[in-house]
Amino acid sequence: GENVEQHPSTLSVQEGDSAVIKCTYSDSASNYFPWYKQELGKRPQLIIDIRSNVGEKKDQRIAVTLNKTAKHFSLHITETQPEDSAVYFCAASNTGFQKLVFGTGTRLLVSP
Amino acid sequence: DTGVSQDPRHKITKRGQNVTFRCDPISEHNRLYWYRQTLGQGPEFLTYFQNEAQLEKSRLLSDRFSAERPKGSFSTLEIQRTEQGDSAMYLCASSPKFRVSSEQYFGPGTRLTVT
């Protein structure tokens, strides 16, 4: 089955810096890759996603890139703000099975 | 609030007791998922419904776990004879029906503590 690895497990940056979180997946049939932000004690919130027919997607300060050949995808956050501090999870799924397989999470800390 | 809702938000139970959780998906969503999340980990898939049909169950789901979605709307997850290892956050998610994989929106979760 699918296996998703995520790095780093923790990431500390200064406000205004960029942050990059990377994930790799094992199942070449996976074609949908969402990213979730989870604040302490709250539900995972979908922040951006990408499908396998697209190489890059942007939404304001957030972007996701996908390399199907290498089977990895990344989350890029620019101009980080303290409110970006949270745990971020990547995930993968394919059309046939629908379930999301999550990475182990990255704790992002943005210091003022 | 038109998002996914779950009840109860917290449940403390003694080992060996049965517990049942409820999930109400977003009204126009026909797909419903249950996940389990332990501290410091990502959510793990448990089971998935499309309308009232349970289409997939994880091997993680022992025979003590059962889920239903009788009318294709709300769903219940029951754990029988709870064990301390069942302590976790149980998350429900829903997604609309499209021909390809679609976004899943999560509820606030039910935190289960087995003493």
Image: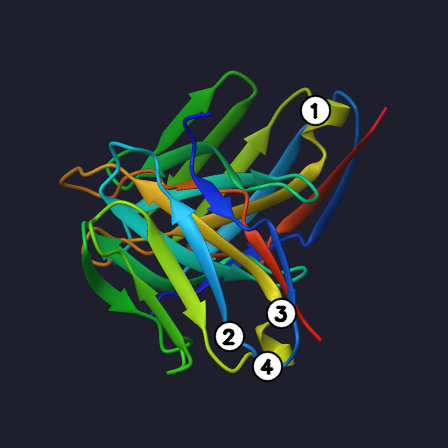
Quarter of image, res B100: top left
Dot 1: element: loop
Asked whether the beta carbons under mark 2 and mark 4 sit within 8 Å of each other, the answer is no
Type of the residue with mark 4: Glu
Compared with B79, A110 (above or below) is: above
* Alpha carbons under labels 3 and 2: distance apart: 13 Å
Asked whether the beta carbons under mark 4 and mark 1 sit within 8 Å of each other, the answer is no
Judging by the rendered image, the residue that carries numbered circle 3 is B87
* Residue B50 horizontal/vertical position (percent): 20, 52
Q: Nearer the viewer, mark 1 or mark 3?
A: 3
Q: Which chain carries label 1?
A: A
**Same chain shared by disc 1 and disc 3:** no
* Alpha carbons under labels 1 and 3: distance apart: 34 Å
Dot 3: element: loop
Q: Nearer the viewer, mark 2 or mark 1?
A: 2
Judging by the rendered image, the residue that carries numbered circle 2 is B18
Asked whether the beta carbons under mark 3 and mark 2 sit within 8 Å of each other, the answer is no
- Judged left or right of residue A88, residue A50 is left
Judging by the rendered image, the residue that carries numbered circle 1 is A80
Dot 2: element: loop
How many residues crowd around disc 1 within 10 Å: few (fewer than 14), some, or many (20 or more)? many
* Alpha carbons under labels 2 and 1: distance apart: 45 Å
* Alpha carbons under labels 3 and 4: distance apart: 8 Å
Seen as rendered, the residue at the extreme top is A60
Q: Mark 4 lies on which chain?
A: B
- Judged left or right of residue B96, residue B79 is right
